[in-house]
Amino acid sequence: MSDLKIKRAHTMSPEQIKTQIEALADKLVDKFGGSYHWQGDEIRYAYSGGVNASVACTASDVEVNVKLGMMMSMFKGKIKSEVEEYLDQHIA
């Protein structure tokens, strides 16, 4: 099992940050499959191929936590760079 943790500060309103995080979850579903749901201010994504992720939104931060199963751990670098790129482009 392999873990990723990525944290970014933001100055967006709660509605704006939730919209951007949900768009990230939609992108994951489109690209890899799986599903997501909101649990309070946290979105949880799961893919049966070995990915469990959560994105927690606070008034000042977004924290992404990803747990990769053995098969998906070989894509850790690619997944990390795609999540970081998305956050860099959409979270301010």
Image (spheres, rainbow, N blue to C red):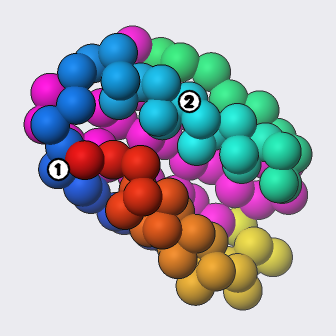
Instruction: Give the distance between the C-alpha atoms of the residues marked 1 and 2, in whole angstroms.
Output: 17 Å
Residue type indicated by callout 1: Ala
Whether residue 54 is visible: yes
Could you say whether the residue bearing mark 2 is in a helix, strand or loop?
Answer: helix
Whether residue 46 is visible: no
Q: In this orientation, which residue lies closer to the viewer: 12 or 71?
A: 12
Residue 37, label in figure: none
Q: In this orientation, which residue lies closer to the viewer: 21 or 16?
A: 16
Residue 9, label in figure: 1
Question: How would you classify the magenta stretch by its main secondary structure?
Answer: strand
Q: Residue at x 33, y 47 (%)?
A: 91
Q: Residue at x 48, y 25 (%)?
A: 19
Image: 89 above or below 76: above
Q: Position of residue 58 (x, y in %)?
A: 20, 30
Q: Are marks 1 and 2 in contact (CB under 8 Å)?
A: no
Label 2 crowd (10 A; few <14 / some 14-19 / many >=20): some
Q: Is residue 12 left or right of residue 3?
A: left
Residue type indicated by callout 2: Glu
Q: Residue at x 22, y 31 (%)?
A: 12
Magenta span has 75? no
Q: Is residue 30 left or right of residue 36?
A: right
Quadrant of image for the N terminus: bottom right
Q: Position of residue 66 (x, y in %)?
A: 52, 57
Q: Is residue 88 left or right of residue 20?
A: left
What residue range appears in magenta? 40-68
Q: In this orientation, which residue lies closer to the viewer: 6 or 74?
A: 6
The residue indicated by pointer 2 is 22
Mark nearer the N terminus (1 vs 2)? 1
